[in-house]
Amino acid sequence: MIKRRGKVALIGRPNVGKSTLLNSLLGEKMAIISDKPQTTRTCILGVKSTPQGEIIFIDNPGIHRPLHKLNKRMMNLVISSLETADLLCLLIDVTQPFGQGDNFVINLLKKVNRPLFLLINKVDIIRKDKILPIIDHYKDLLPFKEIIPISALRKINLDILEKKIIEYLPEAKTIDENEEKIFLPLRFQVAEIIREKLLDQVEDELPFVTAVYVEKIEDRLTGKRLDEVDYTTLIKEKRNKSFDQLKNESKKANLRKKEKAPGSLTKTKKKRLEGLIYINAAIFVEKENQVGIVVGHRGQRLKQIGLEARRELEELLGARIYLDLAVKVEEHWRDKPDVLDLIEGQKEILSPKD
Ligand SMILES: Nc1nc2c(ncn2[C@@H]2O[C@H](COP(=O)(O)OP(=O)(O)OP(=O)(O)O)[C@@H](O)[C@H]2O)c(=O)[nH]1
Ligand SMILES: [Mg+2]
Protein backbone atom coordinates (compact mmCIF):
# COMPACT_ATOMS: atom_id res chain seq x y z
CA MET A 1 0.00 0.00 0.00
CA ILE A 2 1.21 3.51 -0.80
CA LYS A 3 2.01 5.45 2.29
CA ARG A 4 1.80 9.19 2.54
CA ARG A 5 3.50 11.71 4.72
CA GLY A 6 3.33 15.48 5.03
CA LYS A 7 2.81 18.66 6.97
CA VAL A 8 -0.63 20.10 7.62
CA ALA A 9 -0.87 23.65 8.94
CA LEU A 10 -3.88 24.59 11.08
CA ILE A 11 -4.52 28.25 10.48
CA GLY A 12 -7.19 30.84 11.09
CA ARG A 13 -8.10 33.81 13.22
CA PRO A 14 -7.47 33.75 16.98
CA ASN A 15 -9.88 31.68 19.09
CA VAL A 16 -11.39 29.62 16.25
CA GLY A 17 -10.24 26.33 17.84
CA LYS A 18 -6.94 25.43 16.13
CA SER A 19 -5.25 24.20 19.30
CA THR A 20 -8.36 22.31 20.39
CA LEU A 21 -8.31 20.57 17.01
CA LEU A 22 -4.61 19.70 17.31
CA ASN A 23 -5.20 18.12 20.71
CA SER A 24 -8.31 16.26 19.58
CA LEU A 25 -6.60 14.87 16.48
CA LEU A 26 -3.62 13.67 18.48
CA GLY A 27 -5.56 12.54 21.53
CA GLU A 28 -3.01 14.32 23.73
CA LYS A 29 -2.66 17.75 25.24
CA MET A 30 0.01 19.33 23.07
CA ALA A 31 -1.20 22.92 23.01
CA ILE A 32 -2.86 25.01 25.68
CA ILE A 33 -6.40 26.27 25.14
CA SER A 34 -8.25 29.33 26.35
CA ASP A 35 -11.32 31.38 25.57
CA LYS A 36 -9.08 34.47 25.13
CA PRO A 37 -7.66 35.32 21.70
CA GLN A 38 -3.93 34.94 20.89
CA THR A 39 -3.39 32.05 23.25
CA THR A 40 -0.92 30.24 21.00
CA ARG A 41 2.25 32.26 20.47
CA THR A 42 4.39 29.76 18.64
CA CYS A 43 4.10 26.76 16.32
CA ILE A 44 3.33 23.48 18.03
CA LEU A 45 3.97 20.29 16.09
CA GLY A 46 2.35 16.94 16.64
CA VAL A 47 2.73 13.72 14.67
CA LYS A 48 -0.18 11.41 13.97
CA SER A 49 0.66 7.96 12.65
CA THR A 50 -2.07 6.13 10.79
CA PRO A 51 -2.03 2.92 8.74
CA GLN A 52 -2.03 5.14 5.62
CA GLY A 53 0.94 7.23 6.64
CA GLU A 54 2.02 10.03 8.88
CA ILE A 55 0.56 13.49 9.35
CA ILE A 56 2.60 16.23 10.94
CA PHE A 57 0.13 18.77 12.26
CA ILE A 58 1.31 22.31 12.87
CA ASP A 59 -0.75 24.46 15.22
CA ASN A 60 -0.16 28.16 14.62
CA PRO A 61 -0.82 31.48 16.32
CA GLY A 62 -4.07 33.10 15.20
CA ILE A 63 -3.81 35.45 12.22
CA HIS A 64 -4.13 39.08 13.32
CA ARG A 65 -2.66 42.50 12.59
CA PRO A 66 0.60 42.63 14.53
CA LEU A 67 1.11 45.71 16.70
CA HIS A 68 4.10 44.57 18.74
CA LYS A 69 7.36 42.74 18.01
CA LEU A 70 5.92 39.67 19.76
CA ASN A 71 2.96 39.66 17.35
CA LYS A 72 5.22 40.25 14.34
CA ARG A 73 7.18 37.15 15.33
CA MET A 74 3.91 35.23 15.76
CA MET A 75 2.79 36.26 12.28
CA ASN A 76 6.18 35.38 10.77
CA LEU A 77 5.68 31.86 12.10
CA VAL A 78 2.27 31.70 10.42
CA ILE A 79 3.75 32.90 7.12
CA SER A 80 6.48 30.29 7.25
CA SER A 81 3.87 27.58 7.96
CA LEU A 82 1.88 28.75 4.94
CA GLU A 83 4.99 28.43 2.83
CA THR A 84 6.20 25.05 4.05
CA ALA A 85 3.07 22.97 4.69
CA ASP A 86 1.82 20.43 2.14
CA LEU A 87 -1.77 21.22 3.02
CA LEU A 88 -3.45 24.15 4.74
CA CYS A 89 -6.55 23.81 6.92
CA LEU A 90 -8.32 27.12 7.40
CA LEU A 91 -10.50 27.01 10.49
CA ILE A 92 -13.40 29.38 11.01
CA ASP A 93 -15.66 29.80 14.02
CA VAL A 94 -19.21 29.18 12.82
CA THR A 95 -20.65 31.32 15.63
CA GLN A 96 -18.80 34.46 14.52
CA PRO A 97 -20.02 36.76 11.74
CA PHE A 98 -17.71 37.34 8.75
CA GLY A 99 -15.69 40.50 9.32
CA GLN A 100 -12.57 42.53 8.59
CA GLY A 101 -10.29 39.97 10.21
CA ASP A 102 -11.66 37.24 7.96
CA ASN A 103 -11.02 39.38 4.90
CA PHE A 104 -7.43 39.83 6.05
CA VAL A 105 -7.05 36.03 6.26
CA ILE A 106 -8.65 35.44 2.84
CA ASN A 107 -6.34 38.00 1.22
CA LEU A 108 -3.30 36.42 2.83
CA LEU A 109 -4.31 32.99 1.55
CA LYS A 110 -4.92 34.26 -1.98
CA LYS A 111 -1.16 34.69 -2.29
CA VAL A 112 -0.42 31.09 -1.28
CA ASN A 113 -0.56 28.31 -3.79
CA ARG A 114 -1.19 25.17 -1.72
CA PRO A 115 -4.08 22.76 -1.34
CA LEU A 116 -6.54 24.31 1.05
CA PHE A 117 -9.38 22.90 3.19
CA LEU A 118 -12.06 24.93 4.94
CA LEU A 119 -12.99 23.60 8.38
CA ILE A 120 -16.16 25.13 9.76
CA ASN A 121 -15.63 24.64 13.47
CA LYS A 122 -17.88 24.64 16.55
CA VAL A 123 -20.87 23.13 14.72
CA ASP A 124 -21.85 21.54 18.03
CA ILE A 125 -23.28 24.87 19.18
CA ILE A 126 -25.17 25.98 16.10
CA ARG A 127 -28.34 24.91 14.27
CA LYS A 128 -27.57 22.80 11.19
CA ASP A 129 -29.44 25.15 8.82
CA LYS A 130 -26.98 27.95 9.67
CA ILE A 131 -24.09 26.06 8.10
CA LEU A 132 -25.21 26.03 4.47
CA PRO A 133 -25.19 29.83 3.95
CA ILE A 134 -21.65 29.90 5.37
CA ILE A 135 -20.47 27.26 2.91
CA ASP A 136 -22.16 29.25 0.15
CA HIS A 137 -20.35 32.40 1.14
CA TYR A 138 -16.91 30.83 1.49
CA LYS A 139 -16.90 28.51 -1.50
CA ASP A 140 -16.29 31.33 -3.99
CA LEU A 141 -13.72 33.19 -1.92
CA LEU A 142 -10.90 30.65 -2.32
CA PRO A 143 -10.44 27.40 -4.25
CA PHE A 144 -11.08 25.04 -1.32
CA LYS A 145 -10.42 21.37 -2.08
CA GLU A 146 -12.73 20.31 0.72
CA ILE A 147 -15.19 22.07 3.01
CA ILE A 148 -15.89 20.14 6.20
CA PRO A 149 -18.09 21.17 9.14
CA ILE A 150 -16.42 19.94 12.33
CA SER A 151 -16.41 20.23 16.07
CA ALA A 152 -12.86 20.14 17.39
CA LEU A 153 -14.19 20.00 20.94
CA ARG A 154 -16.78 17.25 20.46
CA LYS A 155 -14.69 15.42 17.84
CA ILE A 156 -17.36 15.62 15.14
CA ASN A 157 -16.22 14.68 11.60
CA LEU A 158 -12.56 14.39 12.60
CA ASP A 159 -12.40 10.88 11.11
CA ILE A 160 -13.57 12.24 7.74
CA LEU A 161 -11.10 15.09 8.02
CA GLU A 162 -8.19 12.75 8.68
CA LYS A 163 -9.14 10.54 5.75
CA LYS A 164 -9.32 13.52 3.39
CA ILE A 165 -6.04 14.97 4.65
CA ILE A 166 -4.16 11.76 3.84
CA GLU A 167 -5.38 11.91 0.23
CA TYR A 168 -3.66 15.24 -0.30
CA LEU A 169 -0.27 14.40 1.22
CA PRO A 170 2.73 13.43 -0.91
CA GLU A 171 3.72 9.81 -1.21
CA ALA A 172 6.49 8.65 1.07
CA LYS A 173 8.66 5.71 0.03
CA THR A 174 9.61 4.86 3.55
CA ILE A 175 8.54 6.25 6.86
CA ASP A 176 11.44 6.48 9.21
CA GLU A 177 10.21 6.79 12.78
CA ASN A 178 13.21 8.88 13.74
CA GLU A 179 13.34 11.03 10.64
CA GLU A 180 11.81 14.10 12.13
CA LYS A 181 12.03 13.78 15.86
CA ILE A 182 9.98 16.54 17.34
CA PHE A 183 11.45 17.61 20.62
CA LEU A 184 9.47 19.75 23.03
CA PRO A 185 11.35 20.54 26.22
CA LEU A 186 9.38 20.00 29.41
CA ARG A 187 10.36 23.50 30.40
CA PHE A 188 8.36 25.01 27.55
CA GLN A 189 5.33 22.89 28.37
CA VAL A 190 5.46 23.79 32.06
CA ALA A 191 5.55 27.49 31.13
CA GLU A 192 2.56 26.95 28.84
CA ILE A 193 0.55 25.08 31.47
CA ILE A 194 1.14 27.90 33.96
CA ARG A 195 0.11 30.41 31.28
CA GLU A 196 -3.05 28.45 30.60
CA LYS A 197 -4.07 28.67 34.26
CA LEU A 198 -3.19 32.35 34.27
CA LEU A 199 -5.37 32.98 31.19
CA ASP A 200 -8.27 31.29 32.98
CA GLN A 201 -8.00 33.78 35.80
CA VAL A 202 -7.46 37.13 34.07
CA GLU A 203 -9.44 39.42 31.79
CA ASP A 204 -9.10 42.57 29.65
CA GLU A 205 -5.56 43.35 28.54
CA LEU A 206 -3.88 40.99 31.02
CA PRO A 207 -3.84 37.95 28.69
CA PHE A 208 -1.83 39.97 26.17
CA VAL A 209 0.68 41.56 28.54
CA THR A 210 1.63 38.40 30.42
CA ALA A 211 4.21 35.72 29.66
CA VAL A 212 5.66 32.89 31.68
CA TYR A 213 9.34 32.12 32.03
CA VAL A 214 10.50 28.93 33.73
CA GLU A 215 13.90 29.37 35.36
CA LYS A 216 14.44 25.76 36.28
CA ILE A 217 12.90 22.37 36.94
CA GLU A 218 14.91 20.33 39.39
CA ASP A 219 14.68 16.96 41.06
CA ARG A 220 15.15 17.95 44.70
CA LEU A 221 16.76 14.72 45.81
CA THR A 222 19.45 14.45 43.16
CA GLY A 223 19.69 18.07 42.04
CA LYS A 224 19.21 16.87 38.48
CA ARG A 225 17.81 19.42 36.02
CA LEU A 226 14.73 18.22 34.17
CA ASP A 227 14.18 21.21 31.89
CA GLU A 228 15.03 19.23 28.81
CA VAL A 229 13.07 16.06 29.38
CA ASP A 230 11.15 15.63 26.13
CA TYR A 231 7.45 16.31 26.70
CA THR A 232 6.44 14.41 23.57
CA THR A 233 8.19 11.26 24.78
CA LEU A 234 6.88 11.85 28.26
CA ILE A 235 3.21 11.81 27.29
CA LYS A 236 3.64 9.01 24.76
CA GLU A 237 5.42 6.69 27.13
CA LYS A 238 3.76 7.81 30.32
CA ARG A 239 1.61 4.72 30.38
CA ASN A 240 4.43 2.21 30.09
CA LYS A 241 7.49 3.98 31.41
CA SER A 242 8.05 5.57 34.76
CA PHE A 243 9.06 9.18 35.01
CA ASP A 244 12.25 8.04 36.73
CA GLN A 245 13.28 6.15 33.64
CA LEU A 246 12.60 9.15 31.47
CA LYS A 247 14.58 11.38 33.77
CA ASN A 248 17.58 9.16 33.35
CA GLU A 249 17.24 9.37 29.61
CA SER A 250 17.49 13.15 29.70
CA LYS A 251 21.13 12.97 28.71
CA LYS A 252 22.17 16.59 28.90
CA ALA A 253 20.68 17.14 32.32
CA ASN A 254 23.84 16.01 34.04
CA LEU A 255 26.16 18.19 32.06
CA ARG A 256 24.90 21.33 33.68
CA LYS A 257 24.89 20.45 37.30
CA LYS A 258 26.80 17.95 39.36
CA GLU A 259 24.45 15.69 41.18
CA LYS A 260 24.28 15.82 44.93
CA ALA A 261 25.05 12.45 46.39
CA PRO A 262 21.78 11.35 48.01
CA GLY A 263 23.88 9.19 50.33
CA SER A 264 25.14 12.27 52.17
CA LEU A 265 21.62 13.24 53.27
CA THR A 266 19.98 12.18 56.49
CA LYS A 267 17.26 9.57 56.17
CA THR A 268 14.44 11.98 57.02
CA LYS A 269 15.70 14.65 54.64
CA LYS A 270 16.04 12.07 51.90
CA LYS A 271 12.47 10.95 52.48
CA ARG A 272 11.25 14.54 52.36
CA LEU A 273 12.97 15.22 49.03
CA GLU A 274 12.13 11.94 47.36
CA GLY A 275 9.80 12.40 44.38
CA LEU A 276 9.78 16.16 44.86
CA ILE A 277 10.25 18.39 41.86
CA TYR A 278 11.06 22.05 42.28
CA ILE A 279 9.89 24.49 39.63
CA ASN A 280 10.91 28.12 39.64
CA ALA A 281 8.86 30.31 37.31
CA ALA A 282 8.07 33.96 36.76
CA ILE A 283 5.02 35.61 35.27
CA PHE A 284 6.05 38.71 33.33
CA VAL A 285 3.78 41.73 33.21
CA GLU A 286 4.44 45.12 31.60
CA LYS A 287 3.51 47.56 34.35
CA GLU A 288 3.67 47.81 38.12
CA ASN A 289 -0.14 48.05 38.51
CA GLN A 290 -0.55 44.74 36.65
CA VAL A 291 1.39 42.90 39.38
CA GLY A 292 -1.45 43.50 41.82
CA ILE A 293 -4.03 42.25 39.35
CA VAL A 294 -2.19 38.97 38.79
CA VAL A 295 -1.47 38.52 42.50
CA GLY A 296 -5.07 39.38 43.43
CA HIS A 297 -6.66 40.29 46.76
CA ARG A 298 -4.47 38.83 49.52
CA GLY A 299 -2.60 36.85 46.90
CA GLN A 300 -5.64 34.72 46.11
CA ARG A 301 -5.40 34.84 42.33
CA LEU A 302 -1.72 33.90 42.17
CA LYS A 303 -2.39 31.16 44.68
CA GLN A 304 -5.19 29.78 42.52
CA ILE A 305 -3.02 29.89 39.36
CA GLY A 306 -0.28 28.04 41.23
CA LEU A 307 -2.68 25.49 42.65
CA GLU A 308 -4.22 24.62 39.31
CA ALA A 309 -0.87 24.48 37.52
CA ARG A 310 0.56 22.30 40.27
CA ARG A 311 -2.38 19.91 40.06
CA GLU A 312 -1.90 19.38 36.35
CA LEU A 313 1.87 19.11 36.62
CA GLU A 314 1.69 16.56 39.42
CA GLU A 315 -0.59 14.46 37.28
CA LEU A 316 1.70 14.86 34.28
CA LEU A 317 4.92 14.07 36.09
CA GLY A 318 3.66 11.64 38.67
CA ALA A 319 5.58 13.52 41.33
CA ARG A 320 5.03 16.09 44.04
CA ILE A 321 5.65 19.61 42.81
CA TYR A 322 6.94 22.63 44.65
CA LEU A 323 6.01 25.56 42.42
CA ASP A 324 7.82 28.78 43.17
CA LEU A 325 5.81 31.37 41.25
CA ALA A 326 6.62 35.09 41.18
CA VAL A 327 5.33 38.08 39.23
CA LYS A 328 7.93 40.37 37.62
CA VAL A 329 7.67 43.65 35.78
CA GLU A 330 9.41 43.58 32.40
CA GLU A 331 8.49 46.92 30.85
CA HIS A 332 7.40 46.71 27.22
CA TRP A 333 8.58 43.11 26.99
CA ARG A 334 6.42 42.54 23.93
CA ASP A 335 8.74 44.90 22.03
CA LYS A 336 12.06 43.81 23.53
CA PRO A 337 13.96 41.29 21.39
CA ASP A 338 16.10 40.08 24.32
CA VAL A 339 13.05 39.21 26.47
CA LEU A 340 11.28 37.66 23.49
CA ASP A 341 14.41 35.58 22.80
CA LEU A 342 14.46 34.49 26.43
CA ILE A 343 10.83 33.36 26.34
CA GLU A 344 11.17 31.66 22.96
CA GLY A 345 14.40 30.07 24.10
CA GLN A 346 12.41 27.83 26.42
CA LYS A 347 11.47 25.82 23.36
CA GLU A 348 15.11 25.27 22.42
CA ILE A 349 17.52 22.69 23.74
CA LEU A 350 20.45 24.29 25.49
CA SER A 351 23.92 23.28 24.45
CA PRO A 352 26.19 21.95 27.24
CA LYS A 353 28.14 25.20 27.45
CA ASP A 354 25.07 27.33 28.25
N1 LIG B 1 -18.29 24.71 21.40
C1 LIG B 1 -17.07 24.57 20.89
N2 LIG B 1 -16.05 25.28 21.38
C2 LIG B 1 -14.82 25.10 20.84
C3 LIG B 1 -14.58 24.18 19.79
N3 LIG B 1 -13.28 24.24 19.47
C4 LIG B 1 -12.71 25.14 20.30
N4 LIG B 1 -13.64 25.67 21.13
C5 LIG B 1 -13.42 26.69 22.18
O1 LIG B 1 -12.93 27.86 21.56
C6 LIG B 1 -11.99 28.55 22.42
C7 LIG B 1 -10.69 28.77 21.69
O2 LIG B 1 -10.07 27.53 21.44
P1 LIG B 1 -8.53 27.41 21.07
O3 LIG B 1 -8.30 26.02 20.62
O4 LIG B 1 -7.68 27.94 22.16
O5 LIG B 1 -8.48 28.39 19.81
P2 LIG B 1 -7.20 28.79 18.91
O6 LIG B 1 -7.69 28.93 17.51
O7 LIG B 1 -6.08 27.86 19.12
O8 LIG B 1 -6.88 30.24 19.48
P3 LIG B 1 -5.48 31.07 19.42
O9 LIG B 1 -4.40 30.18 19.95
O10 LIG B 1 -5.75 32.22 20.31
O11 LIG B 1 -5.27 31.47 17.99
C8 LIG B 1 -11.87 27.66 23.66
O12 LIG B 1 -12.71 28.17 24.66
C9 LIG B 1 -12.34 26.30 23.17
O13 LIG B 1 -12.88 25.49 24.20
C10 LIG B 1 -15.70 23.42 19.29
O14 LIG B 1 -15.61 22.59 18.39
N5 LIG B 1 -16.90 23.66 19.90
MG1 LIG C 1 -4.21 28.16 19.88
Image (tube, rainbow, N blue to C red):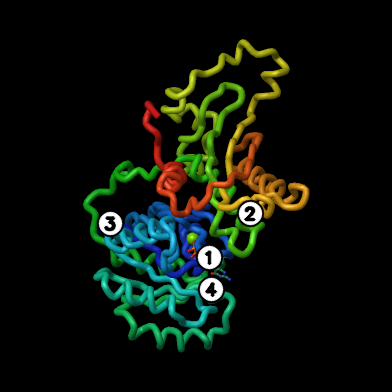
Q: Amino acid at mark 2?
A: Gln
Which residue is painted at 65% across and 54% down in the image? Answer: 289
Q: Tell me the residue at 45%/40% (across/down).
A: 185
Residue that badge 3 annotates: 3
In the rendering, which numbered label is found on residue 122?
4
Secondary structure state at the residue bearing disc 4: loop
Foreground disc of the pair 1, 4:
1
> Crowding at label 2, few (<14), some or many (≥20) Cα neighbours within 10 Å?
some
Q: Residues within 10 Å of mark 4 (few under 14, many from 20)?
A: many
Q: Quick check: 225 left or right of 42?
A: right
Q: Earlier in the sequence, mark 3 or mark 2?
A: 3
Q: CA distance from mark 1 to mark 3?
A: 37 Å
Q: Is residue 353 above or below residue 37?
A: above
Q: Disc 1 versus disc 4: distance between alpha carbons?
A: 16 Å
Residue 163 falls in image quadrant: bottom left
Query: What secondary structure is found at the residue carrying circle 1?
Result: loop
Residue type, numbered disc 1:
Pro
Beta carbon of the mark 4 residue lies under 8 A of ligand 1: yes
